[in-house]
């Protein structure tokens, strides 16, 4: 289930963006490995770090924001959010060949 887009200020002491590959066939949210990413978001929350997942195409360089997703355990759903560009990014982009680098 995907909830509506909301603009939420980060309520944690830190924020970490997790950049993943866009997968149009995955539905919404548009990325694979959701089970791993749900666990990563939950772990970050317990550590006081707000994790959100996004693809490179969701970056708005002009506004210095990114549209991404975080998982809500209470809602049991991915929630779309617009946030400032994170200072730290965990790059989980996987490339199939050298032309993608």
Image: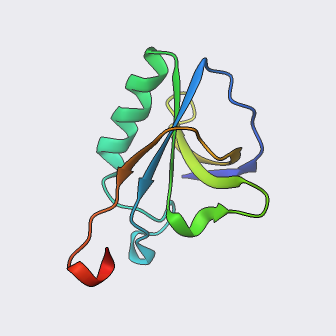
Q: How many marks?
A: 0
Residue situated in front as seen by the camera: 84 or 44: 84
Q: Residue at x 37, y 51 (%)?
A: 91
Q: Residue at x 40, y 72 (%)?
A: 23
Q: Residue at x 48, y 22 (%)?
A: 45
In this picture, is 94 found above or below 74? below
> Going by the image, does 5 lie left or right of 90?
right
> Going by the image, does 26 lie left or right of 73?
left
Residue situated in front as seen by the camera: 69 or 91: 91
Q: Quadrant of residue 97?
A: bottom left
Residue situated in front as seen by the camera: 33 or 64: 64
Furthest-left residue in this view: 97
Image location (x, y in percent) of residue 5: 73, 52
Furthest-bottom residue in this view: 99
> Going by the image, does 59 lie left or right of 32?
right
Q: Quadrant of residue 12?
A: top right
Image location (x, y in percent) of residue 86: 59, 41
In this picture, is 80 found above or below 75? below
Q: Quadrant of the C terminus?
A: bottom left
Image location (x, y in percent) of residue 8: 75, 37
């Amino acid at each position: 289930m995907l909830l509506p887009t909301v603009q939420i200020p980060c309520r944690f002491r830190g924020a970490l963006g997790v950049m993943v590959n866009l997968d149009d066939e995955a539905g919404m949210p548009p990325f694979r490995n959701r089970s791993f990413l749900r666990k990563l978001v939950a772990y970050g929350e317990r550590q006081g770090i707000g994790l959100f997942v996004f693809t490179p195409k969701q970056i708005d360089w002009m506004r210095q924001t990114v549209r991404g997703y975080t998982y809500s355990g209470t809602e049991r759903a991915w929630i779309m959010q617009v946030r400032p560009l994170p200072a730290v990014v965990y790059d989980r982009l996987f490339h199939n060949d050298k032309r993608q680098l």
